[in-house]
Amino acid sequence: MTTGTVELTFRQAVAAALAQEMARDERVVLLGEDIASGGVFKATVGLADRFGADRVRNTPISETAIAGAAMGAAMAGLRPVAEIMFSDFYGVCWDQVAVEIPKARYMTGGQLSLPLVIRGANGGGLGFGAQHSQAVENWAMCVPGLKIVSPSTPADMFGLLAAAIRDDDPVLVFEHKALYGGKGPVPAGEHVVPLGRAAVRREGDDVTLIGLSVTAGVCERAADELEAEGVRATVLDLRTLVPLDAAAVLAAARRTGRVVIVEENPGQLGWGAAIAAILAEEAFGDLTAPVVRVSGGNVPLPVAAPLEAEVSATVERVVAAVRKLA
């Protein structure tokens, strides 16, 4: 058995996970725009050379066609991994993603399963503008039948994508575009991270910071600043929204009594609202202060960096929220 770790960028972790699963299971096939040449974010580099054109298929510029082909391939016995280049473009294929794919197992009484993954770039922070910068996990969280993955580290990107490919239900994997270039250690050899388990990134007794994807890192950097002020924070990285590790959320909240939820999505019906509701219903007596949410603004994201930062969930806003809470 291979032991130790290797340093990979987030995008290399995507390619490595896909390669691991394609080598393990010949039913795993890839499809998407320009993926044979590595894709616009270079997350599938080298896979076409290794596995051939039959298993790494370029598609037309049609998200509807991509999602529909993935659904048909899964129904026919394959385990497709489809790339939607920008998560904003789920709006184009939302009928397949929200209405058809998640309902198939239920509507056939379990006779049919759709073991497919749809993955692609998500989120803002890079000045891509209102139509290419949205974090859309919230859209999917409202749809019964979809599992939702949103990693924050290369190791989790690798392991959670592998688990998603092996899952017998449809899984949406959101890869934050601002994380693609970041490096981190990844276990050498086969690596799988089970869905539905949050990760405690650091432990403290004063406040719990809950993040997902890029905001998990925001929480860690905020915790560094707060520690210098004598405030010790627990940082909980959800990693998956569906299934949600509610037990980890409740345990962290009960330990500290104070919770700040940090989400990139607009706060209007954000996933943070669902977390806050769970805390209100199941941990109200353990809280010593109201749950606070730091979220993206309820506005289309601007292109200009100062304006985009103004409506984003930043370290400064998280630190200010904790100071006010304490």
Image (cartoon, rainbow, N blue to C red):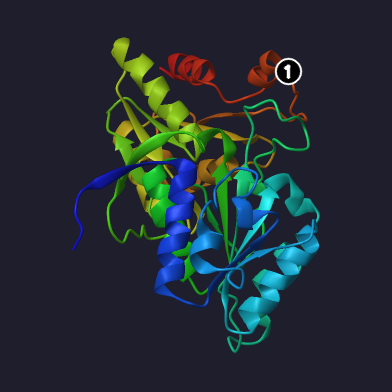
Q: Is residue 131 left or right of residue 152?
A: right
Q: Name the image quarter holding the C terminus.
A: top left
In the rendered view, would you say 238 is above or below 308? below
Q: Is residue 103 left or right of residue 111?
A: right
83, 55: nearer the viewer: 55
Q: Quadrant of residue 172?
A: bottom right
Q: Say whether residue 245 is visible.
A: no
Q: Name the image quarter holding the N terminus.
A: bottom left
Q: Position of residue 66 (x, y in %)?
A: 73, 64
In the rendered view, would you say 31 is above or below 281? below
Q: Position of residue 80 (x, y in %)?
A: 59, 70
Q: Position of residue 143 (x, y in %)?
A: 66, 60
Q: Residues within 10 Å of mark 1 (few under 14, many from 20)?
A: few
Q: Is residue 158 left or right of residue 66?
A: left
In the rendered view, would you say 195 is above or below 167? above
Q: Which residue position holds label 1?
A: 304
Q: Position of residue 280 (x, y in %)?
A: 49, 42
Q: Say whether residue 40 is visible.
A: yes
Secondary element type, mark 1 = loop
Q: Quadrant of residue 194?
A: bottom left
Amino acid tagged 1: Ala
> Residue at 52% across / 32% down in the picture?
262
> Residue at 32% across / 37% down in the picture?
201
> Residue at 44% across / 14% down in the picture?
323
Q: Is residue 131 left or right of residue 202?
A: right
300, 280: nearer the viewer: 300
